[in-house]
Amino acid sequence: MTIIIDGKAVAAEIRQEAKGEATTLLEQGITPCLAVVLVGDNPASKAYVGSKVKACEEVGVKSIKIEMDADASEEALLAQIEGLNNDASVHGILVQLPLPKHMDEDRIIEALDPSKDVDGFHPVNVGKLSIGIDCLTPCTPTGIPELIVRSGIEMSGKHAVVIGRSNIVGKPMMNILVQKGNKANCTVTCCHSGTKDLTEFTRQADILIAAIGVPEFVTADMVKPGATVIDVGINRVDDASDKRGYKLVGDVNFDDVKAVAGAITPVPGGVGPMTVAMLMKNTVKAARMLHGIG
Ligand code: GUN
């Protein structure tokens, strides 16, 4: 029987834990606070920001939503970030990506105070993760070992193959999987668009993580029987039968791969809810760190 990994249930459990941690801070007079900055009106980004703000309400984290026009200047965004960096009541700052084309994402990320960088994208946090110093780490890849281990699947000693090398998922995923500890300790391979004979690598994976951004790219012939398959993709594809005119599919052909995998995440309801849950964890962690609470 293939395990269908229930991301909604695991995410609810983690939000509950974050709520407990937020309550402990509130009892000490600290209200954890997350500022979310949205530039422009990309519908997917708007939806993600909406779900982040909603999760804050549920968990007891104060949220500040800052919306800027798509044609706002980079200087205006930098000024917002500087204000939030200097505001002691704000513990987490998240700038929703992608930014409009005229903005330099690297420059914006580097302007964040690393101790408030709840996305874990700042070079200081990227460096700390790579050398194993406790820090804020990117929400989506940080949630994946939680999803696997809390579904009763061992990770230590397994061969994990990551498809994708983005700064948001693929690269931090490799650095997380290679760490010591029971929620990692994997042998790690990273495949990408330059990989020759991709299937040769993916078929060696005990844990296969797809973060490519291509709808239903991973098919059953690419998967070792019994493998754990984690689908990070969220792709909108046209669907005339859906009242929205589109449906969401992952980077994995779910029905095909389900037949060979030992465990698999669905889309939606797999990795997606975990990203927001880990953001809540990171926000309370940032609040604790900023107040010197261990
Ligand atoms: N866009 C897609 N994923 C993410 C994420 O994890 N954080 C931010 N800030 N933007 C994103």
Image: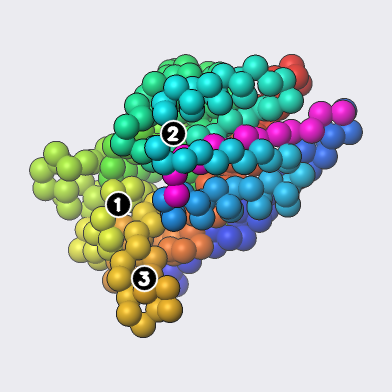
The span from disc 1 to disc 3 (Cα, nearest Å) is 16 Å
Label 1 sits on a secondary structure element that is: loop
Residue 246 vertical position relative to residue 87 in the rendered view, above or below: below
Taking depth in this image into account, of 50 and 56 the one nearest to the observer is 50
Answer yes or no: is residue 271 visible.
no
Q: Which residue is mark 3?
A: 246
Label 2 sits on a secondary structure element that is: loop
Which of the 4 image quarters holds residue 258? bottom left
Answer yes or no: is residue 276 visible.
yes
Label 3 sits on a secondary structure element that is: strand
Q: Is residue 39 magenta?
A: yes
> What's the amino acid at mark 1?
Gly
Q: Which residue is mark 2?
A: 72
Which label sits on residue 213? 1
Report x, y in % for residue 136: 55, 27
For the record, the magenta segment spans 29-41
The residue depicted at 73 percent of the width and 39 percent of the height is 62
